[in-house]
Amino acid sequence: MARRRRQEVVRYAQQRPQFHLEALRLLIDTLFARFPELSGFSVRGCDDGGLFVDHVGVSPGFPADYYEEIFREIVAALAELVAEETEVDEILRGRTFARILH
């Protein structure tokens, strides 16, 4: 299901390249909806110009393999979007995405 949603987001970005920020917002919203335990994550830049996901925060008490699943899903979703929308690379660099609590 998550892969299908990512594909929809990428397709949206391809159809309307001027809306790559909206595609990113949809992707981030999807990640937080899929993983209610996810409290936030950061994206940093590498020396070689690439990106890496850093400081993934999840609710306490979850096993390490579940944390790994969340981490892999974040990386896969962002990599897919960056591959299709190169402008998103610079938008992601140095950003922290956090769940909004009301």
Image: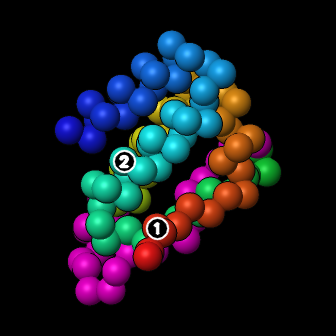
Q: Residue at x 24, y 77 (%)?
A: 63
**Residue type at tag 1:** Arg
In the depicted structure, whether residue 37 falls above or below residue 86 = below
Q: Secondary structure at mark 2?
A: helix
Query: What is the number of callouts on the image?
Result: 2
Whether residue 75 is visible:
no
Say whether residue 86 is left or right of residue 31: right
- From the top left corner, tell me how far across and down residue 64 is, in percent: 29, 74
In the depicted structure, whether residue 26 falls above or below residue 53 = above
- CB within 8 Å, label 2 to label 1: no
Which residue is denoted by mark 1 in the rendering?
Answer: 99
Whether residue 25 is visible:
yes
**Residue toward you, 18 or 60:** 18
Image quadrant in which the C terminus is located: bottom left
Q: Is residue 34 magenta?
A: no
Q: Residue at x 66, y 47 (%)?
A: 92
- From the top left corner, tell me how far across and down residue 4 is, in percent: 27, 31
Q: Secondary structure at mark 1?
A: loop
* Sequence-first tag of 2 and 1: 2
Which residue is denoted by mark 2 in the rendering?
Answer: 30
Say whether residue 61 is left or right of residue 16: left
**Residue type at tag 2:** Thr
Image quadrant in which the N terminus is located: top left
Mark 2, other Cα within 10 Å: few <14 / some 14–19 / many ≥20: some
Mark 1, other Cα within 10 Å: few <14 / some 14–19 / many ≥20: some
In the depicted structure, whether residue 9 falls above or below residue 97 = above
* Magenta span: 49-69
